[in-house]
Image (tube, grey):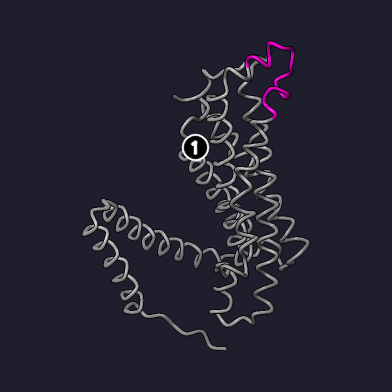
């Protein structure tokens, strides 16, 4: 099947819809029209830039450049994890924990998927590696950020309960077990909801894109199942690691709760 080309005036129509929506928000006095237009402009500029970068990267196809691109994506994801937390750890610990957790989970699952399941030749072929890593990092980033935010907020709210349990002789693992469970559930819930609704409430983005690009629905379904399962695995492992590391950081060597290690 031939892919229908989109011209700039086609994108202009879509742009007009966003501008009309911003006008509606202004008339309704929602005070988000400016944010909507800025977000739309950022979307266009950022996607145009990444499109040019990917064009060059696909042409080169070098492992070094793929690794550098992946490293830059990982660092930016780590920064986003920190930005999404209200009560983050001091001293760059939130960035370190979030980045390390995403590296362990997203990168490991991506390499396993490329080398064992999909099997392009070479395994780091950028047409497969970069989109797959991007989807895994994006979803793992959300899970890690939600998990860490729930954990630190729960520790602040439940300080008295945790300290009472510590004084009764419980270890820091026992005193914080309920917080860690709640944080892990919070990090995994968006992924679980997306998996539960896929194919019934909505058609996932990758599947829709492949069908629009001319792939058969059967092949698009296979790839979408693969992507959603790998996203679930990467998000789960990353959230577990981040919550465990952050929870340990909240207690010192004498198993005392140290909320002074959090901002603000």
Name the residue beneath numbered marker 1: 82
Q: Quadrant of the C terminus?
A: top left
Which of these two is toward me, 94 or 197? 197
Who's the residue at 54% across and 73% down the image? 209
Q: What element does badge 1 sit on? A: helix
**Image quarter of residue 214:** bottom right
Q: Residues within 10 Å of mark 1 (few under 14, many from 20)?
A: many
Asked if the magenta segment contains residue 164, the reply would be: yes
Majority SS type along the magenta span: helix
Which of these two is toward me, 259 or 167? 167
Residue 258, compared with residue 243, is above or below; it is above
Who's the residue at 53% across and 21% down the image? 261
Who's the residue at 64% across and 47% down the image? 188
Does residue 174 appear to the left or right of 34 in the view shown?
A: right
Who's the residue at 66% across and 33% down the image? 180
**Residue range highlighted in magenta:** 163-177
Q: Position of residue 137 (x, y in %)?
A: 59, 51
**Image quarter of residue 126:** bottom right
Which of these two is toward me, 1 or 52? 1
Q: Position of residue 107 (x, y in %)?
A: 66, 50
Q: Position of residue 246 (x, y in %)?
A: 62, 30
Does residue 110 appear to the left or right of 44 in the view shown?
A: right
């Amino acid at each position: 099947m031939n892919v229908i080309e989109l011209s700039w005036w086609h994108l202009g129509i879509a742009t007009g819809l966003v501008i009309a929506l911003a006008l509606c928000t202004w008339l309704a006095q929602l005070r988000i029209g400016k944010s909507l237009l800025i977000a739309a402009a950022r979307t266009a500029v950022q996607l145009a830039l990444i499109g040019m970068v990917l064009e060059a990267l696909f042409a080169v196809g070098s492992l070094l450049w793929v690794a550098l691109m992946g490293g830059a994506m990982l660092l930016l994801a780590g920064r986003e994890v920190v930005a999404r937390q209200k009560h983050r750890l001091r001293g760059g610990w939130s960035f370190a924990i979030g980045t390390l957790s995403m590296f362990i989970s997203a990168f490991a699952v991506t390499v396993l998927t490329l080398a064992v399941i999909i099997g392009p030749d070479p395994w780091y072929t950028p047409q497969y590696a970069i989109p797959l890593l991007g989807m895994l990092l994006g979803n793992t980033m959300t899970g890690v950020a939600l998990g860490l935010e729930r954990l630190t907020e729960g520790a602040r709210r439940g300080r008295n309960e945790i300290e009472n349990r510590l004084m009764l002789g419980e270890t820091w693992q026992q005193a914080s077990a309920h917080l860690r469970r709640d944080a892990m559930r919070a990090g995994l819930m968006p992924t679980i909801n997306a998996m539960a609704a896929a194919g019934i409430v909505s058609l996932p983005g990758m599947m829709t894109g492949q069908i629009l690009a001319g792939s058969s629905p059967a092949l698009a379904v296979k790839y979408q199942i693969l992507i959603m399962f790998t996203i679930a695995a990467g998000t789960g492992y990353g959230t577990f690691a981040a919550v465990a590391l952050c929870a340990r950081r909240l207690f010192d060597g004498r198993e005392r709760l140290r909320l002074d290690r959090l901002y603000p």
